[in-house]
Image (cartoon, rainbow, N blue to C red):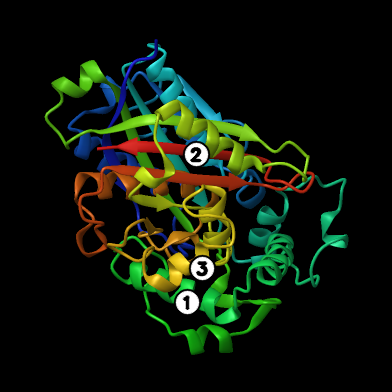
Amino acid sequence: MTARVAIAGIGMTSFGKFLDRSVRSLSEEAVRIAFEDAGITADRVDRVYFGNAAAGLVTGQEMVRAQAALRFTGLMGKPMINTENACATGSTAFHLAWQSVSAGQADIVLVVGAEKLTHVDKAVSFGAFGAAVDMEEKQLDHVGSGSGSIFMDIYAERTRRYMEATGVTSADIAQIVVKSRHAASLNPFAQFRKPTTVEEVLAARMISNPLTLPMCSSIGDGAAAIVLVSSRVAAQLTGARPVWVATSTLVSGSGDTTGPNASARASKAAYEAASIDPRDVHVVEVHDGAAPSELINAETLQLCAPGEAVHLLRSGATDLGGKVSINPSGGLISRGHPIGATGTAQIFELAQQLRGEAGERQRPAAKVGLAQNSGGQVGGDSAAAVVTILTA
């Protein structure tokens, strides 16, 4: 029998390109806000799970990233577990922290996802993204246009197949960006907050056909922190209203491209573990590394039938305040995608939604939230995928 686990505190920095900031300064800010939100101090934390994917490649900091980043937060001496799992890094850290509390190993656990990708040499930043594949497989030789961004080439190839199978148009994909930028314009933490139009998105520079620049997630920096607590501690705290973790599932890609992909398997397990039907979900954060991934992932998560996601988009059902609001934060393409912080930023947004604290982005009466995050590419599937379900 597992114990109930609550989110007691959340904290997040703005996402953007901050050449003058470090993983340490970003982490410190997010942790301070999360502690204030939960109404606790560092001495009460039992252990820390720290998610960072690229510091070794971008800054040279390896092996003891949590200990270095959190050195001056009052947490030294606490058990710190460093987590790296491509774009699913922050979600994996959250998953492990949830397991720790639900198993009764700890009462108060801090999760931090932080990333510093901006570098004076852009090749360093893009090289970090490109390392999340099986380097011996040299997938760049086999996909896309050779744009220089292996993942945008992978997304583009997947998008072309999806468009051919479903009738989705480039204008539909551009509309996702318009929706995303509108949400981000209302999100004080988002990286890209300027509204746009379908015409502007379609006229932008082509990255990998059919993906134009605004359709692609970008380089950025940021951090988000989450305080998880046992139900016993949740009842004692006087901070923010708790949000409950119904379940968190983590899988790796199977390498079998003929069956369900990693996110499909993770979501199936999550729905079963939480005893929740996809139709019960009110607000969703998905991994939209490129804009069309919002449609593809909506179908993968069984939010609609295969090929029907575009109808949800066109009807407005996935807009802010819609029946199933998708990426009210702005998602990766607009809120931003600092790799290790993406998963915890998704949880931050869902917690705000379920507390009723999302302001103009609020989905009315949101009671169930779902986060889907996947990372890396091995054998034609995501290397890792995490699906988390939260309830008010």
Mark 3 burial class by Cα count in 10 Å: few <14, some 14-19, many 20+: many
Specify which label sits upstream in the sequence, 2 or 3. Answer: 3
- Side of 97 where 121 appears, left or right: right
Answer above or below: position of 349 versus 94: below
Q: Mark 1 belongs to which amino acid?
A: Gln
Secondary element at tag 1: helix
Report how far apart the C-alphas of labels 3 and 1 lie in the structure.
10 Å
Residue 197: image location, x then y, percent: 43, 85
Residue 74: image location, x then y, percent: 32, 28
Mark 1 burial class by Cα count in 10 Å: few <14, some 14-19, many 20+: many
According to the picture, the residue beneath numbered tag 3 turns out to be 310
Specify which label sits upstream in the sequence, 1 or 2. Answer: 1
According to the picture, the residue beneath numbered tag 2 turns out to be 387
Secondary element at tag 3: helix
Report how far apart the C-alphas of labels 1 and 2 lie in the structure.
26 Å
Answer above or below: position of 144 versus 51: below
For the point 17% across and 32% down, the residue is: 39
- Side of 131 where 61 appears, left or right: left
According to the picture, the residue beneath numbered tag 1 turns out to be 175
For the point 40% across and 24% down, the residue is: 76
Answer above or below: position of 51 versus 211: above
Cβ atoms at labels 1 and 2 below 8 Å apart: no
Residue 87: image location, x then y, percent: 58, 47
- Side of 299 where 389 appears, left or right: left
